[in-house]
Image (tube, grey):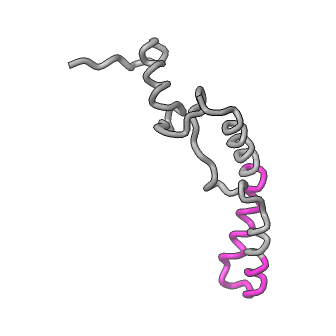
Amino acid sequence: MAKKAMIEREKKRQRLVEQYAAKRAELKEIAKDESKPMEERFKARLKLAKLPRNSSPTRLHNRCQLTGRPHAYYRKLKVSRIMLRELASSGQAPGMVKSSW
């Protein structure tokens, strides 16, 4: 199981991303707009740089909903491979059976 601090840090990042999403999108549009003067675009870039780093969506990392494990994560199921196997073994993941050949 991942440390609780890491899980909480990821939750905090998620909240920041949601909080600043509109402002980031607005500043990025201004910065990309070629019709606007160079000074205005540069000011938009500076304002974008002043926003918290953790408000950037690229800093988010997918984690297992049950254990917080960051690796071997299935996006569709939102769990790690280890938990998926345990859920399937206990019969809680419908349609999954243990393979044998």
| Residue appearing at x 45%, y 30% in the figure | 81
| Location of the C terminus (image quadrant) | top left
**Is 101 rendered above or below residue 54?**
above
Residue 78 in percent (x, y) is at 54, 33
Pick out the residue farthest to the left: 101
Quadrant of residue 11 in the image?
top right
Residue 76 in percent (x, y) is at 49, 36
| Residue appearing at x 73%, y 84% in the figure | 36
Residue 96 in percent (x, y) is at 38, 20
Q: Is residue 17 left or right of residue 87?
A: right
Quadrant of residue 45 in the image?
bottom right
Q: Is residue 44 left or right of residue 68?
A: right
| Residue appearing at x 79%, y 67% in the figure | 50
Residue 43 versus residue 71: which sits nearer the camera? Answer: 71
In magenta stretch: residue 24: yes
| Residue appearing at x 67%, y 36% in the figure | 7
Residue 4 in percent (x, y) is at 69, 32
Quadrant of residue 26 in the image?
bottom right
Q: How many marks?
A: 0
Q: Main secondary structure of the magenta part?
A: helix
| Location of the N terminus (image quadrant) | top right
Residue range (magenta): 18-43
**Is 47 rendered above or below residue 96?**
below
Q: Is residue 25 left or right of residue 74?
A: right
Q: Is residue 60 left or right of residue 36?
A: left
